[in-house]
Image (tube, grey):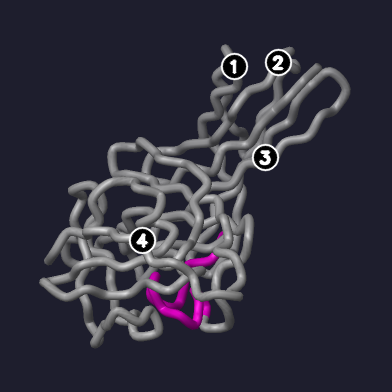
Amino acid sequence: MALFGCASAAPLAGAAPAPEVKQLVAFRDGSVSEKRARAAPTTVRVRGRRCGVAQGTALSALLRSRVGKVGLRDFGSCTRDGRDGAGLFVNAIRGERNRGTDGWTYKVGTRAATAGAADPSGPFGNGRLRRNQGVTWFYCRLRGGSCQRSLTLRFWFRGDLVVFDAKGYDDDGDGVAVPGATIDYGSATLTTDSRGRASTAQLPGSFSVRVRKRTLVPSFAVRVKVG
């Protein structure tokens, strides 16, 4: 295993600009790193070899975001050309290493990717990442052939209330209501009911709100603004 060493690679003349995506990295201790990241082409050193990482891939965004040291293995024959990077595999992020069948994986939207993070064909084999797509990296605990569910949070206003709705999505992108999840909204700490919902009085101001539940992957934050 070799930790990454990232060096810039300029896009080809006339090439489309690298897409900027929303990226969430959820660590095992419950902490998260959420930021926008540009999925620009780059290179990475793996076992003494310099490997190209193609533009528009989840790995290019992860490396460019500088989330911390990323451990990689190459199960293919990488070269400096990102088109040869499909075999690159993430086996550690910021010191959290894969163990057995558990380890790092990623979703685009609510679905688990079916291709490697540096596969030039894209996360589902039908095209690379697009601008503003959400990419979630998390440490999968594989049970019964599936990782733990990942959370999403929606909200709407109803009269003087703000209503939150939490759902959890499996690898196939099938969602269910999540009861007993925690939502911190300003000074209020809410718990979702059997329908995955919670409501409270609107608070004046602007708040970054996400939903969490132990053993599940936290959601991206949503911005709730009143006034």
Q: Secondary structure at mark 1?
A: loop
Q: Amino acid at mark 1?
A: Gly
**Furthest-right residue in view?**
159
Picture layout, residue 157 above or below residue 16? above
The mark lying in front, picked from 1 and 4, is 4
Question: Which residue was labeled with disc 3?
Answer: 165
Question: Which residue was labeled with disc 4?
Answer: 8
Q: Position of residue 55 (x, y in %)?
A: 48, 70
Q: Secondary structure at mark 2?
A: strand
Query: Which disc number belongs to residue 186?
Result: 1
In this picture, which residue range is highlighted in magenta? 110-124
Labels 1 and 2: the sequence-earlier one: 1
Mark 1 vs 2: CB contact within 8 A? yes
Q: Amino acid at mark 3?
A: Asp
> Residue 139's quadrant in the figure?
bottom left
Question: Which residue was labeled with disc 2?
Answer: 205
Q: Amino acid at mark 2?
A: Gly
Rate crowding at label 3 as few (under 14), some (14 to 19) or many (20 or more) other CA atoms within 10 Å.
Answer: many
In the foreground, 27 or 184: 27
Query: Is 68 situated left or right of 42 in this image?
Result: left
Q: Secondary structure at mark 4?
A: strand
Query: Which disc number belongs to residue 71?
Result: none
Residue 115 magenta-highlighted: yes
Q: Secondary structure at mark 3?
A: strand
Q: CA distance from mark 4 to mark 3?
A: 41 Å
Q: Position of residue 199 (x, y in %)?
A: 70, 25
Q: CA distance from mark 1 to mark 2?
A: 9 Å
Query: Is 49 situated left or right of 211 in this image?
Result: left
